[in-house]
Image (spheres, grey):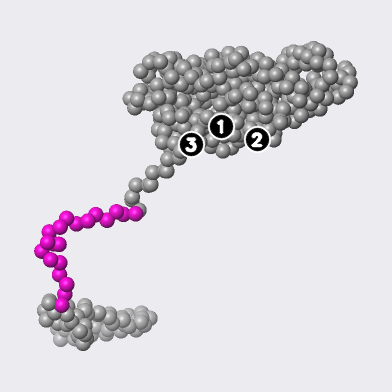
Amino acid sequence: MEIVILAVVIALVAIGAISGLVVSSRRKKQLPPSAPPSTPTITAPPAEPHVGDEAETPRDESRRTIEEVGLPTAEEAVEAPAAVEDPVVAEPAAPEIEIPEPTAGRLVRLRARLARSQNSLGKGLLTLLSREHLDEDTWEEIEDTLLTADVGVAPTQELVERLRERVKVLGTRTPEQLRTLLREELLALVGTDLDRAVRTESGTDTPGVVMVVGVNGTGKTTTTGKLARVLVADGRSVVLGAADTFRAAAADQLQTWGERVGARTIRGPEGGDPASIAYDAVKEGIAEGADVVLIDTAGRLHTKTGLMDELGKVKRVVEKHGPLDEVLLVLDATTGQNGLVQARVFAEVVAITGIVLTKLDGTAKGGIVVAVQRELGVPVKLIGLGEGADDLAPFVPEAFVDALIGD
């Protein structure tokens, strides 16, 4: 029995020794040393000021007493405060209204400028007619001179035939006699008995309505603006209708012309309906009691059908208010005979009542006046003699022919 107990004790001691060795070996397998944990930095919040603490170190400075401070009087304190206008949001200054140059005798005053560029025609004819012997070659030269000046074939033949007859009857020819003869024949060719007044009176309670047509680039919108100046100079009140909605700058350009003489411009969105704007312009002209409404139209010539539809619609809606008193066709005098092709298209589309020739100061081809009147059967009523605002003048045949042949 004692032997059994002793064996158990020895077994327990052996098991304990083995367990200690295992534990001891595990403890020797330590992890690699790691960096010691950093100590966190604690930032204390700034101390809050307490009542009575000074914000900063007091400084010695002079102080004023209440008696030394200038306070408003009781009357000043109850006055209404004066408004101070903010220059940033202030309304822009209205453009200064210009006073256009009077139209009476305007072409006569501009005659010298016209003569400088036009009288090569007259001088050329006088030189040829002054030759001692007027043979066939000379008459051919006279004919070529007239054709070069864009007088046209039929009018040129008529003029040469009449000059031949009168020179033959005249016999001897002094320079003064030749000048008188040539002046009379040119006046007969231009026409002195045509009604060249721009019709701006409707004869009813509605304003006179003038529609301006022509190809873009001929000075159509500028001419409309200058015509407004002519009418204002004659004491008429004007409303402008910017119905050329397909050219981006047309409405802005027309409005600028109107603002310079105090004429209001009715306009719409770019690409809008021209007829609608024309209708509104006449409506506003009636409401304002204006004397004249000027309507600037689009000048596209892509297809004759499209142009006919557009101008025809403008004419129809305008006539809902009253009659259309004048349709002016603007032509560039420098295009010469080529401009007659444009003139024919517009004449087929709308009933033209008068012609405006622009840029007449920059060409020696004054014969276009004769040619375009013959082609359309309507008179030249206005001519543009330059870039100035007041360079649009009523057409006076006598002054024009005198400028052609010179003094």
In this picture, which residue range is highlighted in magenta? 68-87
> Label for residue 112?
2
**Nearer to us in this view, 299 or 329:** 329
The majority secondary structure of the magenta stretch comes to loop
Specify the quadrant of the image occupied by residue 269.
top left
Secondary structure beneath label 1: helix
Point out the tag, 2 or 3, that comes first from the N-terminus: 3
Q: Is residue 276 visible?
A: no
Q: Is residue 259 visible?
A: yes
Q: What's the amino acid at mark 2?
A: Ala
Q: Is residue 65 left or right of residue 290?
A: left
Secondary structure beneath label 2: helix
Q: What's the amino acid at mark 3?
A: Pro
Q: Residues within 10 Å of mark 1 (few under 14, many from 20)?
A: some
Membership of 70 in magenta stretch: yes
**Nearer to us in this view, 281 or 1:** 281
Q: Is residue 27 left or right of residue 113?
A: left
Measure the C-alpha gap from mark 2 to mark 3: 20 Å
> Label for residue 100?
3
Q: What's the amino acid at mark 1?
A: Arg
Quarter of the figure that contains the N terminus? bottom left
Q: Residue at x 50, y 36 (%)?
A: 101
**Nearer to us in this view, 345 or 382:** 382
Q: Which residue is mark 1?
A: 106
Q: Nearer the viewer, mark 2 or mark 3?
A: 2
Measure the C-alpha gap from mark 2 to mark 1: 11 Å
Measure the C-alpha gap from mark 3 to mark 1: 11 Å
Q: Residue at x 15, y 77 (%)?
A: 68
Q: Is residue 120 above or below residue 51?
A: above
